[in-house]
Amino acid sequence: MAESPHVFIYDQLEWDDPLSALDPDKRPPMQLVDQARKLGAKRKKIVRGEGGFFMNRSVMEKGFRVPTHSHDHDELIVVITGSCKFDAGIGDLEAGDSIVIHGGTSYGFTCGDEGMDFLTIRMGEARVALAEQDEGA
């Protein structure tokens, strides 16, 4: 018999503690956590492994900089509102746009004038590795 569907009501989910990774080895670097807290970036971990999916919704302010980093899983980013500019000419995204970034790819981006609200979807809880030098800094 198939497993019952999982329903996630966004307004009933708490904003995430960035250090609450299911796997402690996959917690983000404290440098990223401190920056996010200081600048008001926040996220909700909506799906946490159900059906093999992981999905976060993140909200970042105008000009928020996500430094150059990589993950150990492929990811799909879908912009809900706002925009961002990726480093190294990867591209610029606006509301409704999306990008697939393969595991191991180094990238960073800066949020546009309205900030950005976006979904990140993965097939595993991803580890974050910061690049030695931030390409967009």
Image (cartoon, rainbow, N blue to C red):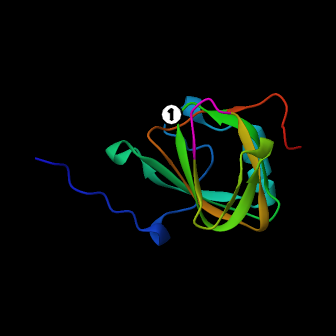
Q: At x 77% / y 30%, what residue is drawn? A: 131
Q: At x 19% / y 49%, what residue is drawn? A: 3
Total labels drawn: 1
Q: 63 or 22: nearer the eye?
A: 63
The quarter of the picture where residue 90 lies is top right
Q: Residue furthest left?
A: 1
The quarter of the picture where residue 132 lies is top right
In this orientation, does residue 29 appear? no
The secondary structure that most of the magenta stretch takes on is loop
Tell me, yes or no, whether the highlighted magenta stretch contains residue 112.
no
In this orientation, does residue 31 appear? yes
Would you say 130 lies left or right of 124 here? Answer: right
Residue 127 lies, with reference to residue 78, above or below; the image says above
Q: 110 or 61: nearer the eye?
A: 110
Would you say 122 lies left or right of 72 here? Answer: left
Would you say 3 lies left or right of 104 here? Answer: left
Expressed as whole percent of the image width and height from the top left, the position of residue 23 reads 50, 33
Expressed as whole percent of the image width and height from the top left, the position of residue 126 reads 55, 36
Expressed as whole percent of the image width and height from the top left, the position of residue 10 reads 47, 67
Q: Which residues are magenta?
A: 100-105
Residue corresponding to mark 1 = 23
Would you say 8 lies left or right of 60 here? Answer: left
Indicate the quadrant containing the C terminus: top left, top right, bottom left or bottom right: top right
Looking at numbered disc 1 in the image, what kind of residue is underneath it? Asp
Expressed as whole percent of the image width and height from the top left, the position of residue 7 reads 33, 62
Question: Tag 1, which secondary structure?
Answer: loop
Q: At x 32% / y 45%, what residue is drawn? A: 51
